[in-house]
Image (cartoon, helix red, strand yellow):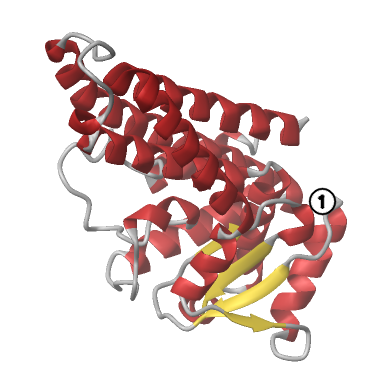
Amino acid sequence: MEQFKTYALMIGLTLLFIWFGGMIGGRGGMIIAFLIAAGMNFYAYYYSDKQVLKHYHAIPVDQHDAGGLYRIVERLTQRAGLPMPALYIIPDQQPNAFATGRNYENAAVAVTEGLLNLMDENEVEAVIAHELSHIKHYDMLIGTVAATIAGAISMLANFGMFFGGDRDRPNPVVMIALMIIAPLAATVIQMTISRNREFMADEGAARMTGHPEWLQSGLAKLENYASGIAMHDADPQTAHMFIINPFTGKDFSLQNLFRTHPTTQERIDRLEQLKY
């Protein structure tokens, strides 16, 4: 069911992209949008996980390199009914973590050295459970495709004046409005998906461990420390993947609208409700 919902969302976002191409460029714009969307979805599905791990210089580890971490992940995957994901450690002092991969068999979990140095075993377990919840619900693929399509719509808008002939174009005022509103709407949709998925993964982690307070404690630590330590090579295109936004403390105006994550206090409050 989760896989079906993931593919349905991918198709929906692709159709939105093609419709936007048609609105600003007629039939030619639709064809170009379809080709771009097909290429981007193919890349996002098969290669985005490898690219993001390479970008953050993630180092693969196993039970010999990181026995404690491996045992935590092994225990949780058995509890969640998931295959063992590939494990990576990122040589960065900002405490953070993310999951990636297109499906259960190709999933990976990466944590930073800063996270392992900061947290106790219960908090590490809660963070890993959060990431495994993302894997269980195909959130990594959904988030990547949503971010890819949002970026593609912005790109298409920038080139809107070059698509189609005069007969195919909509009213110039309508086209200009679309070129402004559509990328903004796509970005808001992407951020909304990301925020909702974080709440769902928090709840999944609390149920997987049976201890919402472990994740509450972990999130509070992550927020406090991440805001004071910049992540090297942090990229806005992948910020939605992390358990805490790597740009924490550096948000700009309209931050609530364009947040990739709910506020940490909102997440802690939601977890508090699961105790009753």
Residue 24 falls in which quadrant of the image?
top left
**Residue 173 in the image: x percent, y percent?**
12, 12
**Residue 87 in the image: x percent, y percent?**
68, 73
Residue that appears at 48% across and 80% down: 57
Residue that appears at 45% across and 40% down: 36
Residue that appears at 87% across and 59% down: 78
Identity of the residue furthest to the bottom in this view: 64
Identity of the residue furthest to the left in this view: 173
Q: In terms of depth relative to the viewer, which is nearer, 163 or 63? A: 163
155 left or right of 113 in image: left
142 left or right of 152 in image: right
The tally of labels here is 1
Residue that appears at 45% across and 74% down: 56
- Asked if one can make out residue 258 in the rendered structure from this viewpoint, the answer is no
Q: In terms of depth relative to the viewer, which is nearer, 67 or 99? A: 99
What kind of residue is marked 1?
Answer: Ala
Q: In terms of depth relative to the viewer, which is nearer, 203 or 98? A: 98
Q: Is residue 76 above or below residue 134?
A: below
Image quadrant occupied by the N terminus: top right
**Residue 38 in the image: x percent, y percent?**
54, 40
Density class for disc 1 (Cα within 10 Å; few <14, some 14-19, many ≥20) is some
Image quadrant occupied by the C terminus: top right
Q: Secondary structure at mark 1?
A: helix
Instruction: Provide the residue designation for mark 1.
Output: 80
Q: Is residue 245 above or below residue 147?
A: below
Q: In terms of depth relative to the viewer, which is nearer, 169 or 227? A: 169
- Asked if one can make out residue 26 in the rendered structure from this viewpoint, the answer is yes
Residue 160 falls in which quadrant of the image?
top left
Residue 32 falls in which quadrant of the image?
top left
